[in-house]
Amino acid sequence: NAGVTQTPKFRVLKTGQSMTLLCAQDMNHEYMYWYRQDPGMGLRLIHYSVGEGTTAKGEVPDGYNVSRLKKQNFLLGLESAAPSQTSVYFCASSYDGTSGSWVETQYFGPGTRLLVL
Amino acid sequence: DQQVKQNSPSLSVQEGRISILNCDYTNSMFDYFLWYKKYPAEGPTFLISISSIKDKNEDGRFTVFLNKSAKHLSLHIVPSQPGDSAVYFCAASPVTGNQFYFGTGTSLTVIP
């Protein structure tokens, strides 16, 4: 049981290049999330998915696209990278996102460090 | 605008003493609160949570207190251990939302 894995761990891009970050989870979780972490900003939600084939915007979605073609995978795409997208990207998953009687926790991947020059 | 705030970027505590980490929020619709712990080069890991119907939740050395009227929660670690040295994030989720809102984190250093 690997939990949440992210590929790649580190990447350097030039401005204008594109790339895709892959997140995979083997816990059969319905919900998946992409966050970015910047100094002094905490974690901010980029996009999330409540199930296979669905995606929704978070706090900071501009410049990113996502896809959830399979339940276990959540892809984050940068079509034209900008220096402002230099950050550490975390993927997370959870059973579902509704507050309720169950313990609502997100399981995070180890992060992808992206540098855009 | 930051809806969840951790106003202390860092905290140093002697081993064996109590660590108190604070978190404030502005959105009255938040009803579930969590604390995460993060070591360098790793993703955050869940530590403890509390629902808005409670004012206290304990798990071993960790206790979270919630003061809804003040929109304030705190994490107490007693006794603090060097292995507790990490960045701690508080997070909140609204009643009907699918989103978690995170604070900026507090870096805790426990001095042996």
Image: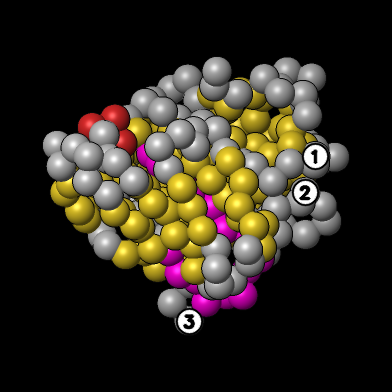
Image mark 2: chain: A
Image mark 1: chain: B
Residue A49 sits in which quadrant?
Answer: bottom right
Q: Identify the coloring.
A: secondary structure
> Residue at position x 49%, y 37% from top?
A61
| A117 relative position to B51: left or right | left
State yes or no: discs 2 and 3 in contact (Cβ < 8 Å): no
**Which mark is drawn over residue A1?**
3
**Residue A91 location (% of width, % of height):** 45, 55
Q: Alpha carbon of mark 1 to alpha carbon of mark 2: how far?
A: 6 Å
Residue that carries the numbered disc 2 in the rendered image:
A99
- Depth order, front residue of A20/A88: A20
Q: Residues within 10 Å of mark 2 (few under 14, many from 20)?
A: some
Above or below residue B36? Residue A6 is below
User: Mostly what secondary structure, the magenta segment?
Assistant: strand
- Depth order, front residue of B47/A117: A117
Q: Alpha carbon of mark 1 to alpha carbon of mark 3: how far?
A: 31 Å
| B84 relative position to A47: left or right | left
| B96 relative position to A109: left or right | right
Tell me the magenta residue range: A23-37
Type of residue at label 1? Val
Q: Residues within 10 Å of mark 3 (few under 14, many from 20)?
A: few
Above or below residue B12? Residue A113 is below
Residue that carries the numbered disc 1 in the rendered image:
B95
**Residue A2 location (% of width, % of height):** 43, 77
> Residue at position x 58%, y 41% from top?
A57
State yes or no: discs 1 and 2 in contact (Cβ < 8 Å): yes
